[in-house]
Amino acid sequence: MTISSDKVVIIGAGPAGVACSYALGKEGQSSLVIEKNTNIGGLCQTIDFNGYLFDIGGHRFLSKSKIINDLWNRIMKSDLLRVERLSRIFYRKKFFDYPLSFFNTFWNLGAVESAQSIASYLYARIARDADDNTFEGWIINRFGKRLYRIFFKSYTEKIWAMSCNNISADWAAQRIKGLSLRVAIKTALLRNKKTTPTTLAQSFLYPRRGPGEFFNNLAQVAAKHGARFEREKIVTGIKHDSGRILSVEVKHTNCHGKEEIPVEYLFSSIPLPCFIKSLIPPPPIDVIDAASRLNFRSYIAVNVVINKENIFPDQWIYIHSPEVRLGRIQNYKNWSPAMVVDPKKTTLGLEYFCTEGDNFWKMSDFNLIDYAVGELERTGIVSRKHLITGFVVRRSEVYPVYCLDYHKHLQVVRSYLDQFSNFQPIGRAGLFRYCNSDYAMLTGIFAAKNFLEKISYDIWKLGAEQEYFE
Ligand SMILES: Cc1cc2nc3c(=O)[nH]c(=O)nc-3n(C[C@H](O)[C@H](O)[C@H](O)COP(=O)(O)OP(=O)(O)OC[C@H]3O[C@@H](n4cnc5c(N)ncnc54)[C@H](O)[C@@H]3O)c2cc1C
């Protein structure tokens, strides 16, 4: 079956939307992709700032899916680098290996703290009395209370701004599945790749000029197959009747223009609660209520150019020190040398997690740069005097919050959406799933297959065990 290109509509040109348009195009189905941003790639875009390239948080390409690995290789060819991973935890002014390695961890902690940590781990293994349904309990059962406090609590609370008691263990199970102190010891002692859980992947792929390059190239191939990308247009309304989507209302972001586009089939990667809010007429009140309880954390990167050739060798560092708000530092030339126009300079992404509209989110760019560089200086990693320039990137609705009862609310929304015969949600925020770009792409590809081949892969459940996480 093929439908006129203007009537198969994809909302969002992030990994899910671009992959969907590509998969449709390859089978002769053209599509219209509506994107509110100027750039293609969503959270995977690469931003050019005076010739220096910045990701929205470094994006490693790592997938267990042959479909995705083949696609990365086919599109990027020799411009896909294999990067040996180095990413450590910064805590008490010391660098700890991450994934945690047994010897380095205990060397840095010192004899007394190490003995206490091992005792607390053994107690946790025997007692097994922490609640495995919460993030806190899940980690304590696998690492003990002391290591939990040192290596998981502060960073996790920086991301989610809530107590680890109120975070679902789903997030831990998804993010660090297969990892425990026992596994870390086994990996350290045996150096056995077969025992290496997903979190411990030692190398990854990375496009020479950042992930945005891949998604731009993929979009170009999709365009050759008939996809049309309309940028700087935002979907503000979705009309429906009798279980069918009829049209989307689209506003131009740079003028007052508005249009209504008829839809025969719709794929949407916009955040699920926004989708529900955009429906005309609105859904029943219980669906609106459930969607409003699906919350996201937002993200700010203060990107800086530093007048120093070498700062640290890692691609990124997790900042666990509770005395600063700073969550992570990316060092882009360690991802690919092509990310810096001048090799004598270093570019850093200082990453913060916040809630859209809170005081941190509302700070001016100038104040944010000042604040972030001040924190960087306090860590002792770089002094303020080396700062050349910087800019700020804000992204809302980035991290789906897995609070304890999110499943219940998600189920209400899903059941309601199932009624639409010509619609599929795709992608990370579209499915309210904390997933990486490979998984987001797969949801787009399999949704396209569902449409083209009239089959029914369950997009909500697609190969979850296939994921890698941080
Ligand atoms: C800091 C950070 C680091 C990450 N690191 C990695 C990593 O190392 N490896 C990895 O694989 N993944 C990583 N990810 C995850 C990856 O970015 C996401 O999984 C992926 O971008 C999700 O793709 P998507 O298409 O579902 O959503 P998005 O990338 O969010 O794209 C959605 C698109 O929809 C557009 N849109 C939204 N609303 C509208 C509207 N109303 N109208 C029109 N357009 C709209 C947006 O502008 C956006 O372009 C990271 C994410 C973050 C935040």
Image (cartoon, rainbow, N blue to C red):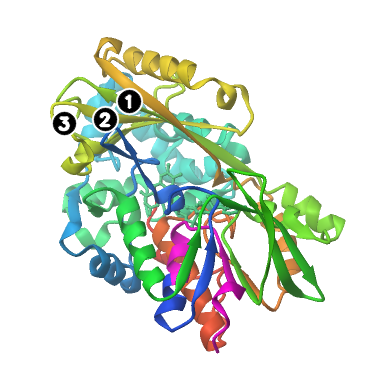
Q: Secondary structure at mark 3?
A: loop
On whether residue 10 falls in the magenta region, the answer is: yes
| Amino acid identity at mark 3 | Asp
Would you place residue 199 above or below residue 351 in this image? below
Q: Secondary structure at mark 2?
A: strand
Question: What's the distance in space between the residues labelled 3 and 1, CA to CA?
Answer: 14 Å
Please name the residue that numbered disc 3 is placed on: 342
| Amino acid identity at mark 1 | Val
Please name the residue that numbered disc 1 is placed on: 304
Cβ–Cβ under 8 Å for marks 2 and 3: no
> Quick check: is the Cβ at mark 1 less than 8 Å away from ligand 1?
no
The residue furthest right is: 285
The crowd level at tag 2 (other Cα within 10 Å; few <14, some 14-19, many 20+) is many
**What label sits on residue 191 in the rendered view?**
none
Question: What's the distance in space between the residues labelled 1 and 2, CA to CA?
Answer: 6 Å
Q: Mark 3 or mark 1, which has the lower sequence index?
A: 1
Cβ–Cβ under 8 Å for marks 1 and 2: yes
Q: Which residues are magenta?
A: 1-21
Say whether residue 298 is left or right of residue 384.
right
Nearest the camera: 402 or 151? 402
| Amino acid identity at mark 2 | Thr
Nearest the camera: 368 or 377? 368
Please name the residue that numbered disc 2 is placed on: 347
Residue at the spot x=55%, y=71% of the render?
A: 459
